[in-house]
Image: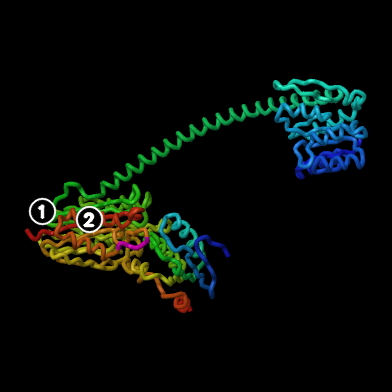
Amino acid sequence: MNAVDIVVAEDSRIQARMLEKVLVDAGHTVRLAEHGGKALELVRERRPDVIISDIEMPEMDGYAFCKAVKTDPELRSVPLILLSTLSDPVDIIRGLDAGADNYVTKPYDPPYLLARMGDLLSTPLDLDTAGEATLDVTLAGQTFQVRAGRQQVLNLLVSTFENAVTKNRELVVVNRDLSLARDELQRSNQELTVLNERISRANAHMTRDLEAAARVQQSLLPDQDVSVPQVDLAWRYVPCTSLAGDFLNVFQLDAEHVGLYVVDVSGHGVPSSLMAVTVGRFLSPKVSDSSLLVRHDGNGGVKVASPSEVAFKLNELFQADEFSGLYFTMLYGVLHVPTGALRYVSAGHTPLAQVSKDGTATLHEISGFPIGFVPEVEFDEESLTLAAGDRIYLYSDGVPEAMNAEREQFGDEAMKRVLSQGRGDALDDTVAALLSTVEAWCVPNGPLDDVSILGLEWGGGA
Amino acid sequence: MTTFRKLNVSKVRDVDVVIFKDSKILDEELLDELRTELLAVVGQRTAPDVLLDFSNVEFMSSAMLGLLGVVHRKMKKADGRLKMCSIRPEIFTVFKLTNLDKLFSIYGDAGEAMKAFE
């Protein structure tokens, strides 16, 4: 196709620029107008070889512009292409009536538009019959009177048909792509379903493992039926996740001694609980190779290790490794039941609480390194002689350091108050009251740390 | 100098001054990040001088003490000097209870601690 002069009427600046680029790239000259009125001025100023016009435009729309061109004797032989979305069947009648030569639907392929232009230019319009006849056209039950030349009508209809065929072909391609995409989607969906099943199986597996681990941990807790003459016992243990770093126990060591401890491994979750279980094996009241608490005395009896000896040996066994930094605090006590003499050691643990019969609560603050921090240190052993009716409480830092929504700690004083006020109640009720007060303090988030409480009341010598 | 996500590290007269950015050192993920970054600060040098500044820290879980223990041991092995400063009273009680106030060199503020390095 030779270079030709084209007037383009298009109100969208972006679309006008895009069309201009297509035409200029194909070697043509282009004059742009943003509406029909402006375009009419341009074509009157100098007769172009082709006109391309949008339909929806302000001032003068495409049909009016087309009509003005086609009723102008000087201009009516200029081929005019309407750019239409062809969303309404009546559009075609309007186009015919306006005398348009060709329809190209938007969005269009540049090569397609250029080809239509080429066709129009190579087939000179038969102007002899143009604008003479009046045709009755029935469309969608409505009859329209159309005045247009035969050649034009034919051109327009053929172009419309061609357009429809092209669109149809595109639709077939799109349809095929869609069905391919649908198959792909179905396949992906199946894969997702399989993956989902795998994840939920893995999840169930992990949940079972965690539950099993939690049961192993539960085995570190006191026997439900532990009972010692002259001694009342009560305890509560609430891990903040399924696996805890806390554990506690109380048991009879020999005929006259009761041992009790609360251990708090730093952190929580799997690493801490694994360490807790390992430590628990060494704190067994049954004579074995691993128990640090009791050993054979050589005369068929049992020898009870002193609390400081237990702490020392644990500290040698559990030096924190470089990577994990896991360590634990512990309060371990041995009560001589006939006399009420308590010997205990604190490895960086929260103070022992003592509540006398009159309700006075005392915290015995003693400092000591946590287990695993410093090798070869001795742990000072403290002693205390209980009076008949005295209660002692061992607990983890989850009690005094429990935080409320304002991040205030529950505190030692509040804890002492609950223990004093519960002095008249059964020991189990007091331990339960302390737990529920801590839990109420932590509403709505709940405790962020494991909570362990172990209470003992000494009834006096036999 | 390497940049850290959870620490501000600057060199003041041969001392690596490490300021914790977070005000709450509570969750395990943060602790893991701090472990990696603190060990990177200590690095493989011989006789490093390191000051840990806690002025931003309002809450600290006890698991953080374990990490400080790890740093302490690593510094000791490397013949380095580790000091700490600006620990709030609420947090300091935990150091006291665990005797760690005796194990670690703790100073009121960065000025005192820096003087102690001289």
SS under mark 1: loop
Quarter of the image where one finds residue A98: top right
Marks 2 & 1 on one chain: yes
Quarter of the image where one finds residue B61: bottom left
Q: Residue A433 carries which label?
A: 2
Q: Which of marks 2 and 1 is nearer the N terminus?
A: 1
The answer to whether B45 appears left or right of A65 in the picture is left
Q: Quadrant of the N terminus of chain A?
A: top right
Residue A260 x, y percent position in the rendering: 21, 56
Q: Quadrant of the C terminus of chain A?
A: bottom left
Q: Mark 1 points at which residue?
A: A229
The answer to whether B35 appears left or right of A285 in the picture is right
Provide the major secondary structure of the magenta segment.
loop
Asked if residue A119 is among those painted magenta in the image, a careful observer would answer no
Where is A207 relative to A332, above or below?
above
Residue B33 x, y percent position in the rendering: 47, 57
The amino acid beneath tag 1 is Pro
Q: Between marks 2 and 1, how big is the CA–CA gap?
A: 25 Å
Relative to the observer, which residue lies in front, A449 or A177? A177
Relative to the observer, which residue lies in front, A460 or A294? A460
Q: Residue A32 carries which label?
A: none
Q: How is the image coloured?
A: rainbow
Residue A198 x, y percent position in the rendering: 45, 35
The amino acid beneath tag 2 is Ala
Q: Mark 1 lies on which chain?
A: A
Start-end of magenta stretch? A406-410
Residue A178 x, y percent position in the rendering: 63, 29
